[in-house]
Image (tube, helix red, strand yellow):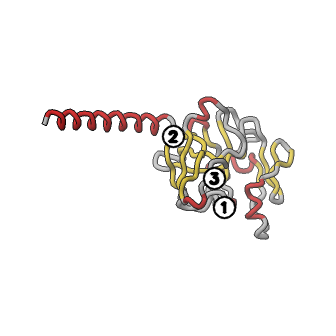
Amino acid sequence: MEKLKKEGLEWIKAIIIGSICFFIIHTFFFTNYVVDGESMSPTLENGDKLVINKITYRFNDIKRFDIIVFHANEKEDYVKRVIGLPGDEISYKDDQLYINGEPVEEPFIDPMLKKGLTKFTNDFTLESVTGLKVIPDGYIFVMGDNRKHSYDSREFGLVPMDAVIGKVGIRYWPLSAFATSF
């Protein structure tokens, strides 16, 4: 009986330590996210399950074209692609992205453009959608890859960098679409 009691106590300790480790990892290092909607299609699809790396931006800067998850409001988090960084002037003309007046390729939207869609991304300037000529320090401009069906910075404005939860690191579901880099 004493041996059974001792073994039960060891199991309880292991469960408590495991729970504490899980809480720390989930709170400070990684979290999961489920894609809701078609705004990131074809890169990410509705229902895809992702692991978000919460620590990468503590050591590295946010980069153009990173796919991030951020707090959109008190109840919702969004997944979008970073298009503009602080100091950038953004515009679109005839489905071409211009950053600081220079054309920039977006290979991740090629599958949608190959479908023969015309005016995939409506023409706009940063100033026309935000009232600002240049993205200020501490903010980023984000868009979904499915430009026709994305609620993004064109509607809700710039995203404060401190609202960013982390970078999409792994798509683990569905298994057939498993991926580790975006």
Image quadrant of residue 84?
top right
Q: Residue at x 63, y 52 (%)?
A: 152
Is the residue 110 above or below the residue 82 in the image? below
Disc 2: which residue? 30
Residue that protrudes farthest toward the top in the picture: 59
Between disc 3 and disc 1, the foreground one is: 1
Disc 1: which residue? 42
Pointer 3 and pointer 1: residues touching (CB < 8 Å)?
Answer: no
Task: Inspect the image, locate mark 1, and give the three-letter code of the amino acid beneath it.
Answer: Pro
Q: Is residue 67 left or right of residue 10?
A: right
Image quadrant of residue 122?
bottom right
How many discs mark residues in the rendered view?
3
- Looking at the rendered structure, the secondary structure element under dot 2 is strand
Is the residue 124 above or below the residue 59 in the image? below
What is the crowding at mark 1: few (fewer than 14 residues within 10 Å), some, or many (at least 20)? some
Q: Residue at x 57, y 46 (%)?
A: 69
Q: Nearer the viewer, residue 45 or 25?
A: 25
What distance separates the C-alpha of mark 3 from that of mark 1?
Answer: 16 Å
Between disc 2 and disc 3, the foreground one is: 2
What is the crowding at mark 2: few (fewer than 14 residues within 10 Å), some, or many (at least 20)? many
Q: Nearer the viewer, residue 78 or 171?
A: 171
What is the crowding at mark 3: few (fewer than 14 residues within 10 Å), some, or many (at least 20)? many
What distance separates the C-alpha of mark 2 from that of mark 1?
Answer: 24 Å
Disc 3: which residue? 152
